[in-house]
Amino acid sequence: MKAFRILIRNIRDAFISVIRNFSLSIASISSITITLVVVSISILLTYNVANFTRLVEEDVTIVAFLDKDVSPERILEIKDELSKIEGIESYIFESKADILKSMIETSDVFKNIMSNWDDTDNPLQDTYLIKVEDLHKIDGIADQIKGIPNVSLVKYGEGVVQNLIKTFDIIRQISIGIVAALIIVTTFLISNTIKLTIFARKTEISIMRLVGASNITIKIPFVFEGLFLGIIGSIIPIIATVYSYAFLYDNFDGQVFSPFIKLVAPNPFLYVVSLMLLGIGITVGMIGSWWAVRRHLKA
């Protein structure tokens, strides 16, 4: 019970200190706010880039065209050979008759031209539609498929897919680097700002040490002060993130430039991002405060 009362008193004193030294606290709050706005943009970008990559991986298909005179027995043998290639997630056989039927159903023009084709007239080729587990390995897998006898052609948008994935990877890595750098810089800025607060209260700290207060007793109010700074500094970025992203999602119908590049749905995504921003703000504030008071007490 006594420990609980002490905890409540420390929280109260920390809150009062933030209000009393608001002119100094505003610098820390501003640092956290500006940082979290940029961190929010980076998080949104990172998550959406990861979503773009996932959609690309789901959509990209290797199409293996078989020789026109391939026999049914050989088609089954090719299926067995595909099953032995490492990295292939799934494969579906599509006969030239099935392809013809699908094309006729998609267009009146195709229907007019192709409706009279029979098995003899049909110039299309049997194919295998192949999905891979990792797009980074698609080139090697495609080369192995090309080496299978009676596979006449392999197409998968080579060149475009790799460049797209590389671009997404670079954007994701840059975003993660920006987030990490900003967190470190903000922690340092908060630490320096808290130092000013500590310097202004050095007489109070000296008296506490003279009456036998332990270092941990002195540190705790400052740590809670950092917690409050983190919470206050997180409010604007969270509000801006929620409303801005929801507005962007609604006005662009959940996609960027084309239906191929879809944004992550706001719910529950924005709740997760908001909690992340709040957690980062609190953590940075508390660590910065702890670091500052620890260095002062060692001096």
Image: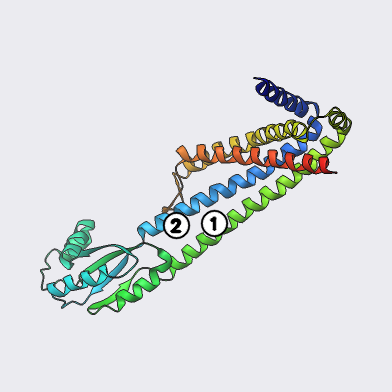
Is residue 110 depicted above or below 279 in this figure? Answer: below
Is residue 20 depicted above or below 72 in this figure? Answer: above
Res. 35 image quadrant? top right
Colour logic: rainbow
How many marks the image carries: the answer is 2
Is residue 252 depicted above or below 115 in this figure? Answer: above
Q: Residue at x 78, y 35 (%)?
A: 215
Residue 257 in view of the camera: no
Residue 22 lies left or right of residue 173; in this view the side is right
Instruction: Decide which of 76, 60 is in the foreground and name it.
Output: 76
* N-terminal-most mark, 1 or 2: 2
Res. 276 image quadrant? top right
Residue 247 in view of the camera: yes
Residue 266 lies left or right of residue 144; in this view the side is right
Question: Residue 28 location in percent, x, y?
Answer: 74, 38
Q: Which residue is mark 2?
A: 53
Q: Residue at x 12, y 68 (%)?
A: 117
Q: Residue at x 82, y 43 (%)?
A: 298
- Where's the N terminus, which quadrant? top right
Question: Residue 246 location in percent, x, y?
Answer: 51, 39
Q: Which residue is mark 1?
A: 172
Residue 72 lies left or right of residue 106; in this view the side is left
Q: Neighbour class for label 2 at 10 Å: few (<14), some, many (≥20)?
A: many
Q: Residue at x 51, y 39 (%)?
A: 272
- The outermost residue toward the front is 212
Name the secondary structure under disc 2. Answer: helix
Q: Neighbour class for label 1 at 10 Å: few (<14), some, many (≥20)?
A: many
Give, as a three-letter code, the residue at label 2. Answer: Thr
